[in-house]
Each structure stands twice: as structure tokens, then as C-alpha cells.
Image (tube, rainbow, N blue to C red):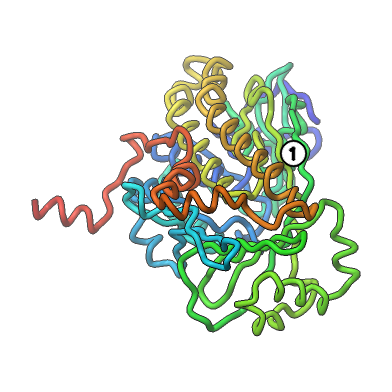
Amino acid sequence: MTTTSERDTGSEKSNGSRSERTTCVVVGGGPAGMVLGLLLARAGVHVTVLEKHADFLRDFRGDTVHPTTLDLLDDLGLFERFDALPHSKLSRARVQDSDGREVTLVDLTRLPLRHPYIAMVPQWDFLDLLAEAGRAEPTFDLRMRHEVTGVVRDGDRVVGVDVESPDGPIRLLADLVVACDGRWSLVRRETGLPKREFPVGFDVWWFRIPTRRDLAESLLPRFNDGEVAIAIPREGYLQVAYLGRKGSDAALRARGIEDFRARIARLLPQAADDVAGIASMDDVKVLDVRVDRLSRWHAPGVLCIGDAAHAMSPVGGVGINLAVQDAVATARLLAGPLQRAGSDGPVREADLRRVRRRRLLPTVVVQGVQRVMHAALIDRVLDGDVTGPPAAAVAAWRRVPALSAIPALLIGVGPRPERIPAWARRASSARGRRLVRR
């Protein structure tokens, strides 16, 4: 960690790095970082987004784009371009009852939504779309292959970050640093913000099963003899999450690919003829599942949002949606203070505190539901105590199908959805044509 009081743009540092200045540095080019960067740029704030990789291509990042995020794209004038991307749609989640009949537990079509489905799209396509929209704004600066190596302090205040770039080290000074660099956030670690961690007893292994079958627009959780798999229909393949006990990755790999294929065939008999498409255990990626949240999301000059503030379980696939909602709230609450930064002094801690105050309730509610699901279902299935969701609950859903709207509301919309500020909205070309005709 580096301490400095030097704040002049263009000055040379003793360590040989050059110094630059912007208004806001966003660390991390994931969904939260890219949405925040775009929104702040549309407010006229000079924002620099730093992404350490050369591109957004990463296997099995979260590929879910929820209805509220689809609404966001609509309001930003980007939905038509997004809708043109290759993607599949999930509108329901079904399980089998004790008689082997399918019961719909989640049904997004029962909600009054503009887009009553979850779009499954490769995250790199989603991020490329946001990057293209950001580059259309004169105050937006996205820098790939720029890895943050530390924070810069002036006394107890964070005033920027040190960056390793393709052209050498840079010291990037800013009125505010926003950490969007995920659950392993370097900025969060460097600032020493207090964290509360919740125990999780399982990990997730992600992989693809290529298939030419016609796939329904529904999620397919399957439970069998202490194992869980969730199959997500995609274009030309199933994306599968296999759940197992935390720390068992080495043992799972030691048993080899044939054993793994047999496990998946038992869990997903409809894909049994296709499991040979899992070429080797190298195609199976493990996710170390964590659930935690910061007790305080900010320090002087720095703010954490998304997974950097609250690591989520993959249950419900809501982590990306929650991070995007954090970004919308952050832009709405901090665009004004950032526009005034410099002339009115630094961004106040009171302004940063408002972000956590706004977003804490949905974070606590979602993590609470996830932890209940862990204890009441996933852990019990993995221990062999139960073979699936409680029979009484499944029977209730069968008798009253409208109950499927309740989890749909939590998953598809979530607690306290955020709206795009008026200054960031743009009409799509199709909407513009409709308005002209009217």
C-alpha cells in the first residue's frame, strides 16, 4: 500500500510511474462496474473503468440477465441491440414430485413484467454491449489490461489507485474509487473494511453438455442420492451446475471423467446420451461458493458495491442482478456529489453511506433466503436426509399454481428494484419511431 499527498496530474512519481487524474475510478469491468461507468458517464462525470484482462471472455461467469436488468437495458435504449445477441430464455423452474410429474415452482410469466423471462446470454456479449454504449459517451474511459495493484492514500483518505498497464505503472488519482472487483476484491482487502462471513457447506462445478435436442424454456433442478444438478437450457447445449460438498474437488477429479459422466447421467437422464460431450475434467470448473457482506461498504474516498460488498451464493442466480441494482443506486446517489467534486471538496462519507443504507435491505433479504435454502434443502440433500423439495410444498404448488409467482418475484425482480435516473435514459430506435407516429 502506498501513501502520498501528491495530487498533481502529470507529475512523475519516484517509483517511475506516471500520474493521471479522473473524477471516479471504477475497479473491475464486470456487470456492476460497466453499468456504473456507463451511468456516471451519461451524467457527465469523468469515469475510468479498469479491467485487468484483455477481454471479457471468461468461462462460466454468471450468464443470467434478469427482468429488472432487461428493463434497465430498455430504459438505456440498448434493449434492441441486446435482443439481437444469441441467447436463450428461461421463464420457469420445474421440479419432479414423488410420482415423477413436473411441478412449476417458479413462473415469471405470472408477473406483470415488460420482459417476463431471464435471458441466458454469454456475459462477455453483455459486457461488450455496455462497453460499446460507454464509448459513445465523451467522459467514459474503459482501459483493458489495467490491473490495480494497490490503493493510494493521502492520510486516511483513499485518493486513487496504483495500476500496472501495458505501458508501465500508472498512478491514477480520483475523487472516488469504487470497488467492483468481485468477492476477491483487492480494494476491499487493502482498505480493511470489516466483513461478516456465513458458513457454506457446498461448492458448485460448472460444465456444458452439448446437445441437439429441443430444450424447454425452464430450469431443471434434479436431486438423487445425495447429489444435486441444475440444468440450464442454452443454445445448442445444457449449462449444468453440479453441487457437492465443499473441499471435495480433488476427490471428484481423482475419480475421473467416466465416473463423473455416470453421475450426471443418473441425475439428468434426459441428457444421458449426450454426457460424452464432457470431454475431460478440465472442462469442469469449480466455483468456491462464499456468502459474506461488509459491515461498512465505504471508507474516506472509496466505496465497495456488488460482490466486493456482498458475495452471494449462486442459488437463484441473483448475484448479477443484485450487483447491477447496486450500480444503479450508486449512480443515482453519487452522480451529483461527483459532479460537484473538487469545487465542493471531496465526496463526503455521508454520501457514500447512503449507498449501503439504500442497498442493505435487499442484500440481507436475498442472503437470508439463500441461507435458508442451503440449510433446509441443499445441505439436507447432500447429506442424504431428503431427496428433494418438501413433498407438502410441492403438493401446495400443484394445487395452487399461482404460488409460483412468489419465488418468481423474488428471483426475477428482487427486493427494492432500482430505476434508471431520467438523465441516463435514452429511447430505443423502435420506441422513438412509435413516439413519432403518435
Above/below status of 308 relative to 426? above
Q: Relative to 248, does residue 252 appear above or below in the rendering?
A: below
Q: Residue at x 48, y 79 (%)?
A: 214
Give above or below for 163 relative to 351. below
Quadrant the N terminus occupies: top right
Residue at x 65%, y 26% (from the top left corner): 159
Quarter assignment of residue 374: top right
Q: Residue at x 45, y 41 (%)?
A: 139
Q: Is residue 47 visible?
A: yes
Residue position for label 1: 186
* Front residue of this view, candidates 154 and 191: 191
What residue do we see at 51% from left, 45% from top? 321
- From what the image shows, is residue 88 above or below residue 427? below
Q: Can you tell which quarter of the image residue 204 is in? A: bottom right
Q: Where is residue 115 shown, x and y percent of the image?
A: 35, 54
Look at the image and tell me whether residue 241 can be seen: no
Q: Is residue 430 left or right of residue 108?
A: left
